[in-house]
Image (cartoon, rainbow, N blue to C red):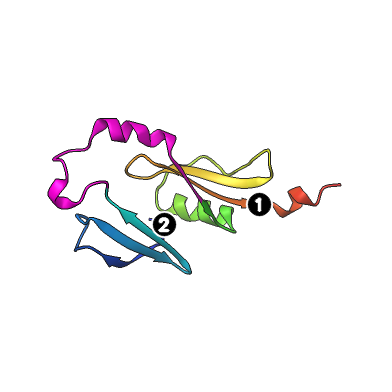
Amino acid sequence: MLGFEVVQASGEGDDVDWVLLKLNSIELMLNTAYEKPGRPSGPDERRVSAHADTLFYFSHPDIDMLYSYLLGKDMHLKQPQITGYGWKDIYLLDPDGYQLCFHWPVPCYYNRS
């Protein structure tokens, strides 16, 4: 959905222990909490409920373009906001319930007299 391509993975399909993703010069590696032999049959609700306190920040130079791109993928998002410290951002939840923030400084915010 975000445009990353799978560079390497520990197996085929979605049932893998780790995956290395790449988008332009950005690399992101994701790893499961449990390797296959020790993986529980279903999600541990205590772990999932704790996801709300985890937020991943990604820098992206064109928040408005990213917002339009994600809307085109049928994602439901709030419009980009400018923070009190002068960054434009958008927030979303990934399929596992983790919060993702894409943000970038607003140049005109810092050029104020």
Amino acid residing under circle 1: Pro
On screen, residue 14 versus residue 109, left or right, reads left
**Residue identified by numbered label 1:** 105
Task: Name the foreground residue: 31 vs 96.
Answer: 31
Q: Which residue is mark 2?
A: 2
Apparent side of residue 53 relative to residue 87 in the rendered image (left or right) = left
Give the quadrant of residue 7. Answer: bottom left
| Mark in the foreground, 2 or 1 | 1
Quarter of the rendering occupied by the N terminus: bottom left
Which label number is shown at residue 50? Answer: none
Helix, strand or loop under label 1 = strand
Q: CA distance from mark 2 to mark 1?
A: 20 Å
- What residue is shown at x 30% (from left), y 53% (from top)? 31
Q: Position of residue 112 (x, y in %)?
A: 82, 47
Return the x and y of residue 113 as percentages of the image width and height. Answer: 86, 47
Q: Secondary structure at mark 2?
A: loop
Could you tell whether 12 is left or right of 88 in the image?
A: left
Identity, as a three-letter code, of the amino acid under mark 2: Leu
Q: Nearer the viewer, residue 67 or 38?
A: 38
**Does the stretch in magenta take in 40?**
yes
In this picture, which residue range is highlighted in magenta? 33-57
Residue plotted at (59% across, 59% down)? 61
